[in-house]
Image: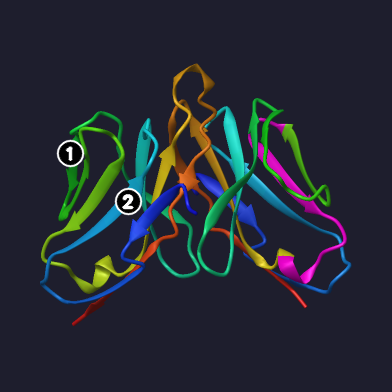
Amino acid sequence: DTAVSQTPKYLVTQMGNDKSIKCEQNLGHDTMYWYKQDSKKFLKIMFSYNNKELIINETVPNRFSPKSPDKAHLNLHINSLELGDSAVYFCASSQGQALAFFGQGTRLTVV
Amino acid sequence: SQELEQSPQSLIVQEGKNLTINCTSSKTLYGLYWYKQKYGEGLIFLMMLQKGGEEKSHEKITAKLDEKKQQSSLHITASQPSHAGIYLCGADMTGGSGNTGKLIFGQGTTLQVKP
């Protein structure tokens, strides 16, 4: 069983569209994250949720909205997609300090 | 400037050679994590270091955190093609009761191992 799973793995869409990326973890962790990896492989945190509560919200455009229906799921919805949103988005989960489990990533390409 | 600097940015070594990747910060690192990423895949957790002077090993990979907790190195002995990928260091710079699990990442080191 995959510990942290994201769908879809690849997403190609046109500018202006709205899209969602889903994430699920089956580890029983309390905390989940969204990270963005740009074309230079630089990985930066976007959001963090602990037990469905938002605890980190970095400087991210409000076109990005995370939603956590329960502590095992953290979805990312993006409105009005722009070319600069093209990146790989990683979901991750942790329990305590060790951030150890990442999903396989969603490669978003905006054309 | 980056809070966490990795060097080198890329590395090409002959199979069987040893190599070292460094991760440096001007701030105290309350937790230092090493990950490996292969193209098109997620991050694979390698090791976590927390104490000054701590050293951990897994197979042919050894990671150390210096006594001042501001620099870590990842050393691969007798490299193999399977070691190829992107190595990322991530650091918890908040620590204490304010720890949220947020990690700051270095820019990554791309390793190629030539057979």
What number is the disc on residue B27?
none
| Of callouts 1 and 2, the N-terminal one | 2
Q: Secondary structure at mark 1?
A: strand
In reply to whether residue A72 is colored magenta, the answer given is yes
- Which of labels 1 and 2 is toward the front? 2
Q: Secondary structure at mark 2?
A: strand
Instruction: State the residue at coordinates (53%, 21%).
Output: B98
Q: Which residue is mark 2?
A: B23
Report the front residue among B54 and B41: B54
The kind of residue tagged 2 is Cys
Residue that sits furthest to the top in the current view: B97
Q: Name the spot of residue B40 as percent of width and height, x first.
A: 50, 68
The kind of residue tagged 1 is Glu
Q: Which residue is mark 1?
A: B55
Which contiguous range is marked in magenta? A70-84
The chain ID associated with circle 2 is B
Instruction: State the residue at coordinates (89%, 67%).
Output: A16
Q: Would residue A81 appear left or right of B97 to someone viewing this image?
A: right
Q: Residues within 10 Å of mark 1 (few under 14, many from 20)?
A: some
Q: Name the spot of residue B95 as percent of width and height, x first.
A: 44, 25
Look at the image and name its color scheme: rainbow
Above/below status of A105 relative to B96: below
The chain ID associated with circle 1 is B
Q: Name the spot of residue A105 as percent of width and height, x first.
A: 57, 59
